[in-house]
Image (spheres, rainbow, N blue to C red):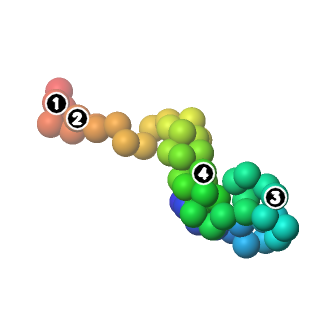
Amino acid sequence: MGCAGGWLYYRYVGCTAGTCAVTSSLWLSTGFGYILGSLLYPVLWPGRGKRQDCDRAE
């Protein structure tokens, strides 16, 4: 999800002159989106990724 966001940011908002550090390159923008998405994923969806123990039904 982060990679897609980085690509969309590059495609529609990015810098065409090449002077912007992150948005001037497709790879940097996509990588930055990936890292940002990885960091924000646990904050936005805190319950996902946790293993639920269904075997302990009492």
Q: Which residue is mark 4?
A: 32
Q: CA distance from mark 4 to mark 1?
A: 41 Å
Disc sitting over residue 5 in the figure:
none
Q: Earlier in the sequence, mark 2 or mark 4?
A: 4
Marks 2 and 4 in Cβ contact (< 8 Å) = no
Check disc 3 and report its element: helix, strand or loop. Answer: loop
Placement of 55 over or under 4, stated as above or below: above
Q: Which residue is mark 2?
A: 53
Q: Residue furthest right?
A: 17
2 vs 4, front mark: 4
Q: Is residue 42 visible?
A: yes
Check disc 4 and report its element: helix, strand or loop. Answer: helix
Which three-letter amino acid code belongs to the residue tagged 2? Asp
Disc sitting over residue 19 in the figure:
3
**Spot occupied by residue 28 in the image (x, y as percentages of width and height):** 60, 57
**Spot occupied by residue 38 in the image (x, y as percentages of width and height):** 50, 45
Marks 2 and 1 in Cβ contact (< 8 Å) = yes
Which three-letter amino acid code belongs to the residue tagged 1? Arg
Q: Earlier in the sequence, mark 4 or mark 1?
A: 4
Q: Earlier in the sequence, mark 3 or mark 2?
A: 3
Q: Residue at horizontal 73%, vertical 59%?
A: 23
Q: Is residue 37 visible?
A: no
2 vs 1, front mark: 2
Which three-letter amino acid code belongs to the residue tagged 4? Phe
